[in-house]
Amino acid sequence: MVDIKRIQEDSYDLLSVVGEVDASSSIELDNAINDAIESGNKKFLVDCSHLEYISSAGLGVFMSYIEEFKKRDITLVIYGLNEKVSNVFEILGLDQLLSIRASKDEAKAAL
Amino acid sequence: MGMVLAALSIIFSKSSGLEQSLGDEVPPILLSLFILSLFTFYKYRIEKAESINFVDLLWKVFVTGLIATIVSLFFQLIMNMLGNTKLAQNLVFLNFIYLSNLGLVSAFLISTFIVWKRLILYQKSRFLLTTWKVFEYALLVSLVFNAMPLPSIDNLQRIYVGIMVFIGLFLSANLKWVAYLNFKQKWKSILLIALAMFYLGYFSFTLFSSTVEISEQTTDFLDFRSNIFILALMGFIFTYALFSLLVLLFNLPTSSVFEQKLEEVVNFQKLSQSIQTEQNEERVYEILLESSSNTVFADAAWVEVSNTHASPTFYTYKIKTEEIERIKSHLSANNIKGILDQGSDKTKNLNKFLSTLKGSAYRSIIAFPIKVKGKQEATIALLKDVSDGFNKENTKIIGTFANQAGISIENFRLLSEALQNERYKEELKIAKRVQNSLLPAELEQDKDFTMVAFSEAADEVGGDYYDSFRINDNKVALIISDVSGKGTSAAFHMSQMKGVFHSLSQHDLSPKEFLVSANNALSQCLDKASFITTSYFVVDTKQKVVEFSRAGHCPTLFYKKADDEVTYFQNKGLGLGILRNNGFENYIQVNSFRYRQGDLIVLYTDGITEAKNNKSEEFGYDRLQKVIKRMSQAPVDEIQRELIQELYAFTGTESIDDDYTTLIVKFN
């Protein structure tokens, strides 16, 4: 079960992801990111401080947008990953392709 | 029967002819015995017949009566032929005739009584049965009473007769059988009962007149007028016959209604039974049309089944499709929002609207929706050539029929769905077997190392893969992969990975070259959000070196015997299929180590480290490390067994969320 909200803050949109992203709820994550980039905004922060778990299908969603972000010149920064989730990103190597920061301030600075 | 009757009457009459020598009490006893034997005879003949219908029973009464009458008329004829001869005046002869008649009447009365019993006890209740028994015993007592002339007490006898009359009347009111006759059977029954009553009257008259005749000459004979049993029986049979006759007569006009109700039930049954496997939806609509139009006596009817893509299908009864179209367009032209437009679920009696339709014989119409799972699938419409032709009852029954048809169709579909699901399950089983065959039956073995592997999928099919391949005499390639997601799509990607492994590994590529080529190949075939994590190993037994790279897969666990330490290799990597254009090679690091005897590597998928217990804790890297450390000196198969056991003990369940795969290599 996952709950995703998008709020407009200053110059960017903030997506907060709460709960667990598994094979079935990864569709919601996909829709949320898709809606976000279709909105025309170019800067996004993803708050994952309440993301408890992400499965490979969830990682696949982030992965599938990497090219898209580049093409559309979109900056998306993820922050607040807990140790477990962060580890999952690192093992797969996604930390090398996505910008991941520890805190919201650091993330804002990276925008 | 005739033989018994004749023999008994002859013996009886003979003995009564010699009455002086035998004494007064003998004739009544003999009569009673005769009656009892008749009773037993008919009881077995009529009661034992199991499946006799009512008209057949009444026919029996008629036949018995006819035989008795013919015999009696024959006696009468002899009497007339004798005229005023001496014999005709003979008291013994007269008595013989009289007694023969009495015997015949008794036979008729008893057989009718038994038939009446069956009629009265049709659909019996416990109370009715008890009452009948009391009545029968009371009659028996009267029979005994006749045989043994006790000092009669007038009052007691009167009370006794009173009670008998009361019970007799009560029993006569049980005429349930009448309701189950159809019109024709009722007419037959009326005729048969009327004839039976006629016989009864005729016999009473004959007996009575001969009694009077005899009693003019002597008082010393068997006067049936003092025989309570015969009188009671006559009274009862007459009363019941009269009741039946009247009830039958009054039921005649309503019998068609009852028949119709019965037909409704039968039709309803037919409809609900129409979901047998060999029948289909078409048949359900046909039965619905047939049953409905028969039940309400519609002059025409149709069922319209809407099709998603094609024009609707019509099932018709005495009406042409053109006429249906005309009626429909007429209704819509008059802006009648009814059921025929398939949109509304209101059932309307559209009587008055049809009267304006010229050239059509029909003056009333009712229509009902046939719904399957709440969705209207068809419409049934019934027509009559009189206005206001459908009453409330008709509406109700057609509504019920339409509902039942809907249920039948729904059941029919559920049945086919269940069959389909069963087939899918079989397909999945086949897929599982095929996938199992994708995993190697045996791993490469070498004098330098021993390997064991274990794999368990969470669903029918999984996305984990491991394999080994001998490149040359001193090189063996090992692989472990995990496809993102799970289930069928993961299983397809896993088979692609196997193809990639077997085609690339034989080229003796370095781990990095292998992964770059694999990434190129898979980028063309994986879907957008799928990737595969892999670790690829080349074991060189000549150099005693293992070279490996990690493409986003879980870090390999390494036990070094010299240090007695279990560690995870910490090299960088990126999953296959994540970067699909170029630059993938920049994210791959190559690592290598020199192995010694007793060293171990443990390959696994994240299903194991992420396996959760009921407190949502993960099995994790530390537990894995500890198990391997503890078991490090054991042979590989024991290490594996212990690991799997520990894993299942940890999760506490046989059902798993993600595929479990391990491959353990121990160097010699």
Image (spheres, rainbow, N blue to C red):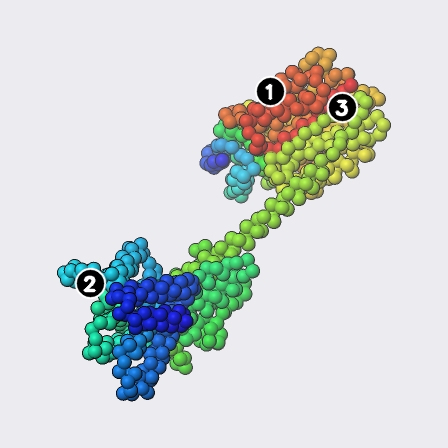
Q: Position of residue B161 (x, y in %)?
A: 20, 63
Q: Are marks 2 and 3 on the same chain?
A: yes
- Residue B159: x %, y % from top left: 17, 60
The answer to which of marks 2 and 3 sits earlier in the sequence is 2
Which quadrant of the view contains residue B87? bottom left
Q: Residue at x 21, y 75 (%)?
A: B218
Q: Residue shown at 41%/82% (left/top)?
A: B359
Q: What's the mark number on residue B22? A: none
Mark 2 to mark 3 CA distance (whole Å): 109 Å
Q: Tell me the tag on residue B161.
A: 2
| Closer to viewer: mark 2 or mark 3 | 2
Work out whether B521 lies above or below A93.
Answer: below
Q: Residues within 10 Å of mark 3 (few under 14, many from 20)?
A: some
- The kind of secondary structure element at disc 2 is helix
Q: Is residue B34 left or right of residue B586?
A: left
Helix, strand or loop at disc 1?
helix
Chain of the residue where label 2 is placed in the rendered structure? B
Query: Residue B667: image x %, image y %?
Result: 76, 20
Q: Badge 3 is on which residue?
A: B450
Tag 1: residue type? Arg
Residue at image mark 1: B623
Quadrant of the drawing holding the C terminus of chain B: top right
